Image: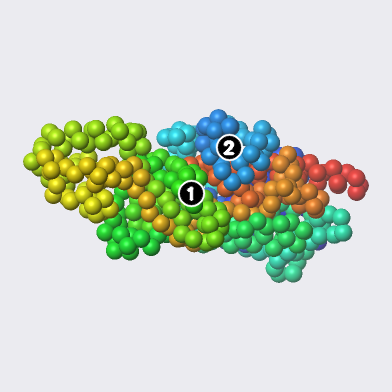
């Protein structure tokens, strides 16, 4: 019967990094994956280019990980984003920085990153075993004993690292396998939900598809609480779809909808779009008034064609009671004021989000209170470690989630390797 110091379950970014870190400590490591190849989710990340990390300062990086970001301070101190950059550059992977600190391989190919990780693991002697689905983790009275494969074979190990991912993008193998194993060790699994995911609305203008495909550039999107106050706001680009909202800022807002809905008894959530976040209402009103005054006999629908999204104009006029063919010479005061107000606060009701199949990230997971942030080790079961998306950690897209995966993976592997060797020394 083959015995390993460390067994890593899951061949994604956190699992590969965990295996490498454990092997670097001198541990005998096996990485098990149920699929036919490693790094499948990594291979499609960043639109197939693999956004390996983000180059922001640590405090700002953590601010972009709204779910459990502060838990990562210790992991980032051991293996942060600058360490990730150095790691890949030392493997001969040249990186480049793009907008908002996103770091990509110069090759623009995720395969470059996946191959480098697999190659590094192999060079350290890690046993890479695909087509090896795990049935259960074996627990003794006081610690981890190893894993039991679905085939019935048992593989003893002093340390087991669970890096099975969450439930998002399930076609890559992320189907939530690790949660029952964590629960069997006594861990709490916080509610799982899709995040970084498109938003669903049943507004009549969404169902009629009149705005389908309309992109809004440099707007601000907010999730409002029942009192109408913003819970979160993001500025950037968004897209109207046949079912609701998508695009970068919609994805970033999506993770907050569930919480507001729960606090509001399951009622629909109000979101608001500020079409001109760089201008105060008074400044906007003056600018639009001046545009209209410059062509006093021209219908407002034609005056504002180049200033406001043309496909949105009919809905804006409808909402405010301002006739589209009104001219500046006959501008009614109250509807005009309402028109300007809606440009700064275009609201819509949303019912929730799309499913895990369309989500980039899983919200919820292994309760962070039950995991040591310095080691990623279980506080309940010695020898058990967690890393990556199985933890109750989620960030925005843009390199933040993969940074958390690499950092927690390295931390788990480093400490699991050391602990396994120490245990082997005691047993000897």
Residue 299 numbered tag: none
Q: Residues within 10 Å of mark 1 (few under 14, many from 20)?
A: few
Give 38 or 329, whichever is nearer the viewer.
329
Looking at the image, which residue sits at the far bottom?
151
Residue 227 numbered tag: 1
| Residue on which disc 2 sits | 62
Q: Does the image show residue 159?
A: no
Tell me the SS state at disc 2.
Answer: helix
Drawn side of residue 371 relative to residue 299, left or right: right
Q: In the rendered image of this protein, does residue 56 appear above or below residue 348?
A: above
Can you say which quadrant of the picture contains the N terminus?
A: bottom right
The image position of residue 279, as x and y in percent, is 33, 33
Q: CA distance from mark 2 to mark 1?
A: 28 Å
Drawn side of residue 214 relative to residue 360, left or right: left
Q: Residues within 10 Å of mark 2 (few under 14, many from 20)?
A: many
Tell me the SS state at disc 1.
Answer: loop
Looking at the image, which residue sits at the far left?
297
Q: Does the image show residue 240?
A: yes
Question: What residue is at 36 percent from the left and 37 percent from the top?
Answer: 277
The image position of residue 137, as x and y in percent, is 75, 61
Corner quadrant of residue 70: top right
The image position of residue 355, as x and y in percent, is 49, 62
The reply to whether callout 2 and callout 1 are in contact (CB within 8 Å) is no
The image position of residue 402, as x and y in percent, is 56, 44
Question: What residue is at 87 percent from the left and 59 percent from the top?
Answer: 141
Question: What residue is at 56 percent from the left and 58 percent from the top?
Answer: 262
Q: State the count of labels.
A: 2
């Amino acid at each position: 019967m083959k015995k390993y110091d460390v067994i890593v379950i899951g061949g994604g970014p956190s699992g590969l990094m965990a295996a490498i870190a454990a092997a670097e400590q001198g541990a005998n490591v096996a990485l098990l994956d149920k699929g036919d190849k490693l790094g499948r989710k990594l291979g499609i990340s960043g639109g197939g280019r693999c956004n390996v990390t983000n180059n922001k300062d640590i405090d700002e990086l953590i601010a972009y990980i709204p779910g459990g970001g502060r838990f990562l301070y210790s992991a980032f101190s051991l293996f942060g984003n600058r360490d990730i950059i150095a790691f890949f550059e030392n493997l001969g992977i040249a990186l480049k920085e793009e907008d908002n600190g996103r770091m990509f391989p110069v090759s623009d190919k995720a395969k470059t990153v996946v191959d480098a990780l697999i190659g590094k693991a192999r060079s350290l002697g890690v046993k890479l075993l695909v087509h090896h689905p795990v049935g259960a983790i074996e627990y003794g009275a006081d610690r981890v004993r190893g894993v039991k494969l679905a085939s019935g074979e048992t593989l003893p190990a002093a340390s087991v690292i669970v890096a099975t991912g969450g439930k998002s993008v399930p076609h890559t193998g992320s189907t939530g396998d690790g949660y029952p194993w964590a629960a069997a060790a006594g861990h709490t699994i916080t509610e799982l939900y899709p995040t970084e995911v498109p938003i669903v609305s049943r507004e009549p203008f969404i169902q009629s598809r009149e705005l389908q495909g309309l992109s809004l550039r440099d707007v601000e999107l907010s999730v409002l609480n029942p009192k109408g106050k913003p819970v979160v706001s993001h500025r950037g680009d968004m897209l109207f779809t046949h079912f609701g909202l998508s695009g970068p800022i919609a994805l970033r807002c999506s993770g907050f909808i569930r919480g507001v809905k729960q606090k509001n008894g399951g009622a629909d959530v109000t979101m608001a779009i500020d079409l001109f976040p760089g201008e105060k209402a008074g400044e906007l009103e003056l600018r639009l008034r001046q545009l209209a005054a410059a062509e006093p006999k021209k219908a407002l629908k034609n005056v504002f064609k180049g200033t406001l999204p043309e496909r949105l104009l009919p809905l804006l006029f409808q909402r405010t009671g301002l006739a589209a063919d009104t001219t500046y010479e006959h501008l009614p005061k109250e509807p005009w004021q309402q028109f300007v107000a809606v440009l700064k606060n275009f609201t819509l009701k949303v019912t929730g989000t799309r499913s895990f199949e369309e989500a980039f990230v899983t919200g919820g997971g292994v309760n962070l209170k039950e995991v040591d942030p310095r080691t990623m080790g279980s506080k309940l079961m010695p020898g058990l470690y967690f890393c990556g998306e199985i933890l109750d950690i989620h960030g925005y897209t843009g390199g933040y989630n993969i940074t958390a995966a690499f950092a927690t993976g390295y931390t788990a592997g480093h400490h699991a390797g050391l602990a396994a060797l120490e245990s082997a020394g005691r047993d000897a």
